[in-house]
Amino acid sequence: MNNVQNKKRANKSRSPFFFTDSFKVLSLIIIISSILLIVTFTFDIVPPILNRGIQPATFPKALLVLIIFLTLIVYFLSLKIPWKKEKKLPKQFFITLYNFILFIIIAKTLDFFLAISVLSFLVSYFWGERRIIYLLLVSILFPIIVFIFFETILGLRFPPGIITNIYYN
Amino acid sequence: MENLYLMMAPLFSSKLLIVLFFGTLFGLILGVLPGLGPTTGGALILPFTMTLDPLSAIVLLTSIYCAGTYGGAITAVLINTPGTPAAAATCLDGYPLAQKGEAGRALGMATVSSTIGGIFSVVVLVFFAPLLAQLAYEFGQPEYFALAIFGLTMLASIGDGSPIKNLIAGAFGILISTIGKDFMTSIDRFTFGINELSEGIGFIPVVVGLFAISEMLTQSTLLDQVFKRITLKAVKLPSIDDYKKTWKTILRSSGIGSFIGVLPAEGGTVASLIGYSEAKRWSEKPEEFGKGSIEGIAGAEAANNAATGGAMVPTLALGIPGSATTAVILTGLIIHGVRPGPDLFREQPEFLYGIFGSMLIANIMFFVFGFFGAKIFARITLVPNKLLWPMIFAVSVCGIYSLNQSLIDVWIMLLFGVIGFFMRRYGFSVVPVIIGLILGELVEGTLRQSLVIFEGNWLMFLTRPIAITFFALSIIALIFPLFKKKTKI
């Protein structure tokens, strides 16, 4: 009796299907796959004389249909056995993600080397490092070693930027 | 005899010995650090291999593979966290034995059984790879297509993840391989007007993104994790009594590991789990398993290292990766212009036997390093993640940029890092994506060429006995996971 009541309670407390991770993740896969499937219809069609076996769009189309089909199977199976609820992502994860975006912006607009230094400093800091000597080691000394290694040993030329230009001039 | 001489060639080349030394050392460090491991490490080192000749590059990658697979055992025993997924089964008995104050004995057994397993698998590699390559001479396009399909369907049963999610990830990997100009008709596919995408997406940015960057994001969610470390005094060689208890287990697990390794897409993780459970099944004292059984450590460690040589068999003979790390090694072969397959055995035996010999030496080297240096390697785990991962990021970014001096590759790496993180979070393994990406061109190319040969008649595949065999094996590979007790989703 108690078990039945517990089950009923559990069912009541279960979130609506559109709030579940499985629904959100699998819907996203299906939506992206469907968009890409539509895109395959815009691929050029090869005249029969040049067509080697199948049209260039056929293979990706088949793959996307397969992905959608398999995703639907996973979804129906998830109704039977729900996915385990994932823990909320911590603040540090989002900070790391934002740092990636900041890295892209700085590397694109200011300097590639500066972008590495800034990301290394911020990630290390927000992951809990407070000792200034270690922060400088990670954000200045180590990137300089990497820079010199790639520059001199591998002969790599880094993209132009405010710091690399000073070095190259 | 000539082949034996070719195998011993690395011993007489100071350059290869140096490469082997650093590869083994680097592999051990990578194996010890949880979250890194030989696959991620191999991916990180790939851009640097461009400065080496093909043999040195592959020797570097294979030595990282052998040593990294063993290195995972050190952290498994001392901090109950497998350095590599393949060492997960080692934790079950390694850590309890270390808790009893016998960490040196546990690591000694892990070192010896890993070395025996690794050497056993190199012998398997030397004998079976040429035989498989000989068989591959009979293969035409339809057979290669069927073989690639078999390799992909094997993805369904890798690890203990969901078979269907693995297949979705594999199909996603193949889909990525279709980006760019169609290699047969030069028609743009999924380029969205971006010129840089016309050449397609390179393997290395995807591999580094999916393994290294996604791991960095994963580590950002585990910052509050505390490891309980066990201090190691010294690694002890197993006693005569331990050898008596475990020699059968080591040999059995070496055989199991080599066999599992040969199967496309399977690898050390599956091998060690099967090696461990078989050791338990055949043991006279199964009740000791999970409480510090020396046989448990031997069973898991011999099997995961035996899978290294086994996994190289299909990689070199057929161009089908036997595991995630061999997928990285295959990428290394491709970027160095070496096409694995039967022709490689005929035209470049010195190259192949050089790899075999190097793997043999790497196994002996990691034995020496592990035996005398495990205490030092264990200290590497003391490097905090808040310092380690920003440094790995700097190396990854510069390494990827150095490939084509293109920032697009760096963006692709970051994008796949985020994709990889969310894939792993929701139970999609990233390994099938890599294998799908590598096999994608082979699958599509052989399919289309087969259809040209068959004049568009699909039923002609059924006239090829080898192709039918592979299709039948593919169906078995797809059905097999359904017989597992509970289908995971």
Image (cartoon, coloured by chain):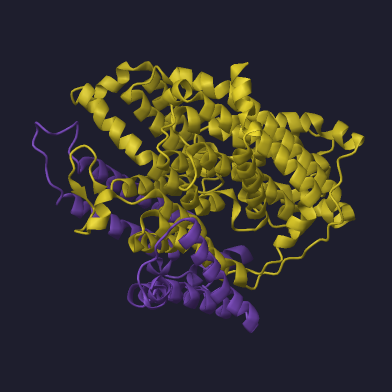
What percent of the width, then of the height, locates residue B241? 91, 35
Q: Is residue A115 above or below residue B333?
A: below
Quadrant assignment for the N terminus of chain B: top right
Classify A132 as above or below B311. Answer: below
Which residue is at 32% across, 25% downward? B141
At 57% from the left and 80% from the top, the residue drawn is A125
Occupied quadrant, residue B61: top right
**Vertical comparison of B252 with A157: above or below:** above
| Location of residue A127 in the rendering, given as x and y in whole percent from the top left corner | 58, 76
Please tell me which residue lies in front, B331 or A164.
A164
Q: Quadrant of residue B364?
A: top right
Side of B141 where B193 appears, left or right = left
Q: Is residue A85 visible?
A: no
How many numbered badges does the structure rendering display?
A: 0
Residue B115 drawn at (x, y percent)? 73, 37
Question: Could you tell me if residue B359 is visible in this image?
Answer: yes
Residue drawn at 73 percent across, 56 percent down: B377
Residue at screen point 43% across, 51% down? B204
Q: Nearer the viewer, residue B190 or B406?
A: B406
Q: Would residue B429 appear left or right of B140 to someone viewing this image?
A: right
Which colour is chain B painted?
yellow
Direction from residue B336 to residue B306 in the image, left or right:
right
Where is residue B482 shown, x and y percent of the image? 50, 39
Between B228 and B488, the one lying in front of the other is B228
Chain A pictured colour = purple
